[in-house]
Amino acid sequence: MFSKEEAAKLRKEFWTSYGKSFPRKWLLYNTRIKDFGFKFVATKKQAMVCLDIESFDKMKNELLYEQLLEVKNLLIEDYLPNAVFDPSYELESGKIIHRIYVEHTEKFNIYNKNTWQATYEFFNANMHMFEEFFEDFEDFIRRAIF
């Protein structure tokens, strides 16, 4: 086991190393749609790339999620074949959000450096495809709330 300080240092090293290995400005929260953004997730047990819809306005969440369901087949067929649509994903905090994600299927542990490189490649490829999808369908997605 690691102390809190050692664990924090390894997590920071993981993300710093990723940024150096794949230097790129990702879209993430710059979607220009409030409470609608992309995330990288890396924990002791899993790694994934996500599109989260997490506004306090439940109607807005539903409208955005329903709009994405309209193009679900295109997302899966043309961009991310392993995408999972979860209308009630529970975050560690207990908050329930709408999440579309792709999970890294190889063994991963943020505290095991031997698993990092494959995860970086997974992050890079899958987030790139999420961004391509968003770029292609941004206007359609925005129609749900604007």
Image (cartoon, rainbow, N blue to C red):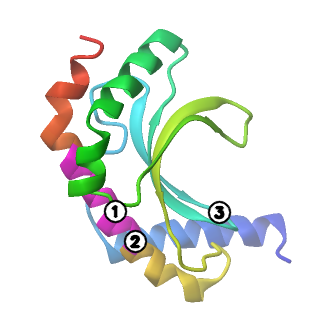
| Cβ atoms at labels 1 and 2 below 8 Å apart | yes
Coordinates of residue 104 in the picture (x, y in percent): 50, 68
- In the picture provided, is 90 more to the left or to the right than 58? right
Q: Secondary structure at mark 2?
A: helix
Residue farthest to the bottom, as pictured: 114
> Around disc 1, counting alpha carbons within 10 Å, would you say few (fewer than 14), some (14 to 19), or many (20 or more)?
many
Q: Secondary structure at mark 3?
A: loop
Residue 70 seen = yes
> Around disc 2, counting alpha carbons within 10 Å, would you say few (fewer than 14), some (14 to 19), or many (20 or more)?
many
Residue positioned 26% across, 62% down in the render: 24
Q: Amino acid at mark 3?
A: Thr
The residue that disc 1 covers is 126
Residue positioned 60% across, 80% down in the render: 107
Residue 132 lies in the magenta-colored region: yes
Looking at the rendered image, the quarter that the N terminus falls into is bottom right
Residue 25 lies in the magenta-colored region: no
Identify the mark nearer the N-term, 3 or 1.
3
Disc 3 and disc 1: Cα gap in Å?
A: 17 Å
The residue that disc 2 covers is 122
Circle on res. 69: none
Q: Secondary structure at mark 1?
A: helix
Residue 25 seen = no
The residue that disc 3 covers is 43
The image quarter in which residue 92 lies? top right
Secondary structure mostly seen in the magenta stretch: helix
Disc 2 and disc 3: Cα gap in Å?
A: 15 Å
